[in-house]
Image: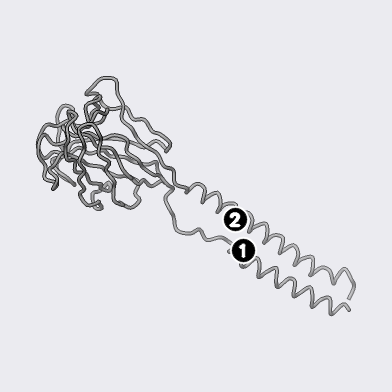
Amino acid sequence: MSLPATLRPLRASYLRSTNRLRTALVSAAVLAATSTSLGAQAGTVSFTGDVAGQVPTLTFGGGPTLLYSSQILSGFGNTSVVTGVNADVRWWNGQYSNQDMAFGNSATTGHVAEIRLEAAAGFDLFLQQALFGGYPNTSRFVSYQLFSDDYTQSTALATVLAGATTPGVGMFDTNGWGNVIRLQFTQTTDEGVAVGRGPYDVGIQDIAYVVRGTIEPPVQVSEPSGLALLAAGLGLGVVGMRRRRVRIA
């Protein structure tokens, strides 16, 4: 057997190993880029305005912009929507526990304000906490709850006391990750019973949130399916080279 003929299988084995290595490196780069794109980003949405009673202007700090809408409901959960003039969330200056805050524009006992926040397509949203205040700079109990967009998933009702000049901090229980989260709040007793003028007498500010890429099922990588197969292929190539060297000798 001539020397060139002997080297042909070795060269073919080398090319196969090189192609496998190149494929594995490309796959690793794609997976690394995907992991980076799925990285969570934390942010805060704040409510501002120029004229008391206006629809609030949203300011996003740190995290990506979210889609926003608001409405007034007759109670917590998927209940009747209150219609009419200004039946939504509005901004007020300096009188909710000494803070500028957004409030539910309804003076009816039992009504709740709902803020709906939505991440961009392909991303999931998680709400962490918010500031709550009492109007007009008074101590009030605020009850709040989170829901998914279709109201099938929610946190337990929680209550926080907002001080006269110091806002209360509401810590949201885990609601899972979803593209849309609905946050509802109103004034209640310390036991969560709706009293007073509903969402009119309590305000909200500085909602902290986290956004991350929606996690999809693992991507099936074509041959080689992973670095383990690459290592196995290289190992077999080395064994083959040793056998051929013995034959040549």
Residue furthest to the top in view is 51
The residue at the point 65 percent across, 70 percent down is 232
Identified by mark 2, the residue type is: Ala
The residue at the point 26 percent across, 20 percent down is 51
Q: Is residue 30 above or below residue 133?
A: below
Residue 57's tag is none
Where residue 153 sits: x, y (%)?
25, 53
The residue at the point 47 percent across, 49 percent down is 38
Where residue 101 sits: x, y (%)?
26, 30
Residue 227's tag is 1
Where residue 137 sits: x, y (%)?
19, 29
Mark 2 vs 1: CB contact within 8 A: yes
Q: Is residue 186 above or below residue 6?
A: above
Q: Residues within 10 Å of mark 2 (few under 14, many from 20)?
A: some
User: Which picture quadrant has residue 74?
Assistant: top left
User: Which picture quadrant has residue 75?
Assistant: top left
Which element carries disc 2, helix, strand or loop?
helix
What residue did someone put label 2 on? 28
Which element carries disc 1, helix, strand or loop?
helix
Q: Is residue 107 above or below residue 22?
A: above
**Relative to 87, is 218 on the left or the right?**
right
**Colour scheme:** one colour
User: Which picture quadrant has residue 133?
Assistant: top left
Identified by mark 1, the residue type is: Leu
Where is the N terminus found, in terms of image quarters? bottom right
